[in-house]
Image (cartoon, coloured by chain):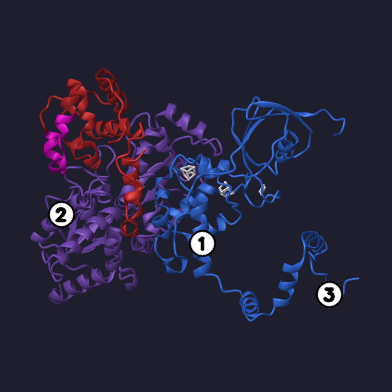
Chain colours: A red, B blue, C purple
Amino acid sequence: MPRQREVSTERLRERVEEMSGEKLFACYQCGMCSAACPLTEEMDRLPSQVIRALQLGDPTVIESNAMWVCASCFACEVRCPKGVDLAKLMEALRQIRLRRSLDWISLDELPRERIRELPQIALVASLRKKAG
Amino acid sequence: MTDEKPTQIFIMGKAYDVPPGVTIMDAMEYAGYRFVRGAGCRSGFCGACGTVYRKEGDYRFEFALACQEMVQDGMHLTQLPFTPAPRAAYELPSLDSSENVLLQYYPEIARCVSCNTCTKACPQDLEVMEYVQAALRGDLAEVAALSFDCIQCGLCAMRCPADIKHYHMAQLARRLLSVSASPVPEHLTERLKAMASGACGEELDELVGLDVDALKERYSAREIEPAAEGAA
Amino acid sequence: MNAITYFPGCSLKDSAASFERSTVAVMERLGHPLEELPRWTCCGTVAALATDDLMHLVAAVRNFERAQKIEAEEIVAPCAMCFNTLRQVAMRVNVDVEARDKINAFMNEEEDYEGGVAVRHLLEILRDRVGWDAIEEKVTEPLFDLPVSAYYGCTLVRPSGVGIDDPAAPAVLGDLLEALGATVVKTPFDTECCGSYQVVDRRDLAVDRSLRILRAAITRGAAVIATSCPLCQYNLEEARRGALAEGMLVEATAPVVAYFTELMAAAMGLDEELLPADLRAAVVRSRETTPEGV
Ligand code: SF4
Ligand code: SF4
Ligand code: FES
C-alpha cells in the first residue's frame, strides 16, 4: 500500500472545488456524464457517483480508481446539462494524490519494448496524469 | 597571505575568512577542509566539484565548479559533488540508433516540464533543457552537439523536478552517435594494432620499472606540444 | 504569402514521421509553406486542468514566448493532441493575467510573454484560410469513392469552446475528405475516445476502445480511417494488429488507418514515397474498382 495521509472531508470538498474551479452542488445527478463516459466498465464508481460522493463528503472517493481510468476525453463535459466539467474534478482528485507523492504508475515497471513502440505523446500524457 | 582584506564566506553555515581572489576549492582547503572526494582534476574538466551557493542579498541559487569559481564576499556555499543517479546498463553495439533508444533507457525524459531549471544550473552554460527536448524527439545529433561540453557534474539532475538523469542520457546519445555515425579514426586503429603486436612493449616495461620520483621527473619534463617542424 | 508558423510536436519527429512529411508536402503544394517554430519544446500534453497547476503550463507558454519573439501571431499544429494542449493553455494565459505574470516571473530567463498568440489546428487553416475549393483544385488524383471514416476522436472537438468544430456533429474532416473525392463513412464512434494515454499502463482498455471504433468503421464499409493524432493512430493500429492476429479481421477488408495529410498527399498525386504501403494499396484498389469515366 502506498503511504496514506488523512484528508478531512470538509477539506477534500473545498480543495476539489478550488482546484477544479467547478461547483459540486451544481450537479443534480442526472447521470448524463456516466452515460457519456466510454470507460465506465472499468471504474469502481461511475463519474456521477464520484460527484455524489464529493457532495456528501465521502472521503473514500479518493481511493476510487475512477480518476485513473478517466482518459480526459471530455465526453462528460460536453454532455452535462448543468455545465459541470467533470474532467476537472477527476484532475483535482488525481492531483490531490500525486501531490502527496502517491504516484499511480511507475516508469520502472514499463518494459523497454513497450516504450519503443509508443508514440511520445502517450508517455508524456500518461506521466503527466499518473505520476507527480 | 597578502595584506588585502580577507573575504568572508560561509561553508555549510559557518563563517570563514579566506584570502581574496582564490577559488572556492582553495578557500575550502584554506579553511581546513580536506578533499577525499569532491575534487579531481582541479582544472574544470572532471566535474567532481559541483558547488551551490547563494550570495547575501540575492535570492537566487547559483551553481559553480569549486575549482573554477572565485570566492566572493558573503557567499554561502556547500558542495554537491555527487548526484545519486545510476547509469542505465546497455550493450552499446546491440542498440539500434534509429529507434527511440534514449527514451527506452531514460524514459523520465518524457516527464520534462520545460522549466529550464537544468539549464540555469549548468556550470558549463549548456542548453540542458534543449538537449533533453531534442532527446524526447529522438534527435541524437542535436543532443550530442548541445551536450558535448558536459562534464557530468550532475547539478542539472539534482535540480530537475522531473527526476531526469540528463548527463547519463546525453552520454548515451553521444556514444550511439559515435558508434553509428562517426568514422573509426585510422590512426587509432593503427596504433592499437601496433600495441597489440607488442610495438611499445619495451617502453612500457621501462616505465613499470621506474620509481615514483623518477616517474614524476619524466612527467614534468614531458613534451606537451610537439615542437613545430623547422621552428627556431 | 506569409509562411505559417508550424509546431510539429515530438511524435511527428519520430514515431509519426510520415504525418510530418505529408503535412509539409501538402502545405507546400497548396502554396502555404510551413516554417517550424524555432526552438520549440514539448507542448506538455495533455492539458493540465487544475487551476493552481501553473507549472504544467510552462512548456506551452515557453512556446508562445518563442512565437512572440519571431512576431508570429499564431502557431499551427497538425497533431490534435498538441493542438488541444496548446490551445487550452493559450485560452487561459492569454486572459488570466495573474497566472501569466507568475509564469513570466518564473521563466525569468526569457522575455515576458504578453499574451495574444493564437493556437490553430491545421484543419482550421485548411478550412478557413485555404478553403475546400482551393484544395479541390490541387487534387489531381481524386480518391474516387474511396470510403473513408472521418475519425475525430476527442481532442479536435472537445472540451466545449476549445475544439475546432461542433462537438456533437463535426464536419471539418468530412468536408476535407469530400474535397479529395472520397466518400465519407459516418459512424456513431467518430468522436469516441480511442483510449488515449491509457494505452501505456492499460493497453487492454485502449485496445478495447479502439476495436469498437474499428468495428463500427468496418460494418459501414470504410476502407480507410482518417486520423489527426499519432496516439489515435497508434491505438487504432494496435487494435487492428491484434484483431488480425486473432483472426477477427482479415487483411483484405481491415480498414487502413492513415493521417488525413497522407490522404491529401495521395489525392494531390504527391510523391508516392509519402504514402505508407497499405494506404497506397487501398487507394489503388479503390481506383481499380471505380468504373471508367467516373
Ligand atoms: S549538463 Fe548537467 S552534468 Fe553536464 S555539465 Fe551541465 S549541469 Fe553538469
Ligand atoms: S530541469 Fe528537468 S523538467 Fe526542467 S527543463 Fe530541465 S529536464 Fe526538463
Ligand atoms: S575538480 Fe575537476 S572540475 Fe573541478
| Quarter of the rendering containing residue A105 | top left
Question: Residue A58 placed where, x, y %?
Answer: 19, 23
Q: Say which amino acid is labelled 1.
A: Ala
Question: Residue A42 placed where, x, y %?
Answer: 15, 43
- Helix, strand or loop status at disc 1: helix
Q: Chain of mark 2?
A: C
Whether labels 3 and 2 share one chain: no
Which residue is farthest left? C219
Question: Which SS does the magenta portion mostly show?
Answer: helix
Q: Chain of mark 1?
A: B
Q: Is A83 in front, or is B91?
A: B91
Q: Say which amino acid is labelled 3.
A: Glu
Q: Which residue is mark 1?
A: B141
Q: Which residues are magenta?
A: A32-50
Q: Say which amino acid is labelled 2.
A: Ile
Q: CA distance from mark 3 to mark 1?
A: 37 Å
Q: Let me know if residue B43 appears in the view.
A: yes
| Quarter of the rendering containing residue A49 | top left
Q: Let me know if residue C182 appears in the view.
A: no
The label shown at residue C213 is 2
Q: Which residue is mark 3?
A: B229
Q: CA distance from mark 1 to mark 2?
A: 39 Å
